[in-house]
Image (cartoon, rainbow, N blue to C red):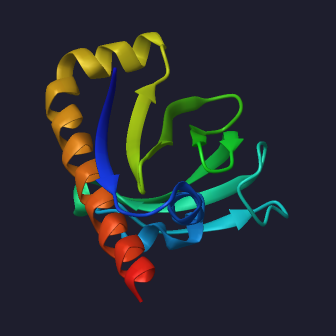
Amino acid sequence: MKGEVTVRMDAPPEKVWALVSDVTRIGEFSPETFEAEWTRGSTGPEEGAYFKGHVKRNGVGPTYWTPCQVTRSVPNELFEFRVGTADVAINNWGYRLEADGTGTNVTEYFRLESKPYLRLYWLLLGKLRGRTNERGMRTTLERMKAVVEREISD
């Protein structure tokens, strides 16, 4: 009920952090979440901040807004958020950053909440959804890599 993908980016952690923690830019990178905005007075990636993501499931639909809350935020190291409400959390997504010489290894990951109905969902559709998530994470990271490396070279 989890998965992850790692891509090395030729950019320092602080540059990568600025990109992965700015939820308003996710539409540039994700094949499913085409926009996001801070909500409830939140303006940045601190723990407890709220935002909502506009998602087109599997890149084709259905389309919906989903509430999210930042659960962990360690500048230049970790950005994680919960999808769903405080009462009904569904999934957790995040980015781990690890300095590697002049670059950064960036791992995007997801972890479904351990609830009976989600375990059933994963049992029935997990392999398919897991592959979709992994393709999406790789696409997201590769698009981020292109942007952050271009910004560094300019």
- Residue at 59% from the left image edge and 60% from the top image edge: 14
Kindly give the residue lying farthest to the top in the view shown: 116
Q: Is residue 61 visible to us here? A: no
Q: Is residue 99 left or right of residue 31?
A: right
Residue 153 sits above or below residue 12 on the image:
below
- Residue at 19% from the left image edge and 27% from the top image edge: 125
- Rendering coords of residue 127 (x, y %): 15, 26
Residue 16 sits above or below residue 109 on the image:
below
- Rendering coords of residue 114 (x, y %): 48, 14
Image quadrant where residue 140 sits: bottom left
Q: Nearer the viewer, residue 84 or 144?
A: 144
Q: How many numbered tags mark residues here?
A: 0
- Rendering coords of residue 149 (x, y %): 36, 73
Q: Is residue 6 left or right of residue 99?
A: left
Quarter of the rendering occupied by the C terminus:
bottom left
Q: Is residue 73 visible to us here? A: yes
Residue 71 sits above or below residue 123 on the image:
below
Image quadrant where residue 27 sits: bottom left
Kindly give the residue lying farthest to the bottom in the view shown: 154
Residue 50 sits above or below residue 115 on the image:
below
Quarter of the rendering occupied by the N terminus:
top left
- Residue at 37% from the left image edge and 76% from the top image edge: 147
Q: Nearer the viewer, residue 48 or 126?
A: 48
- Rendering coords of residue 9 (x, y %): 34, 58
Q: Nearer the viewer, residue 88 or 11?
A: 11
Q: Is residue 44 left or right of residue 148?
A: right
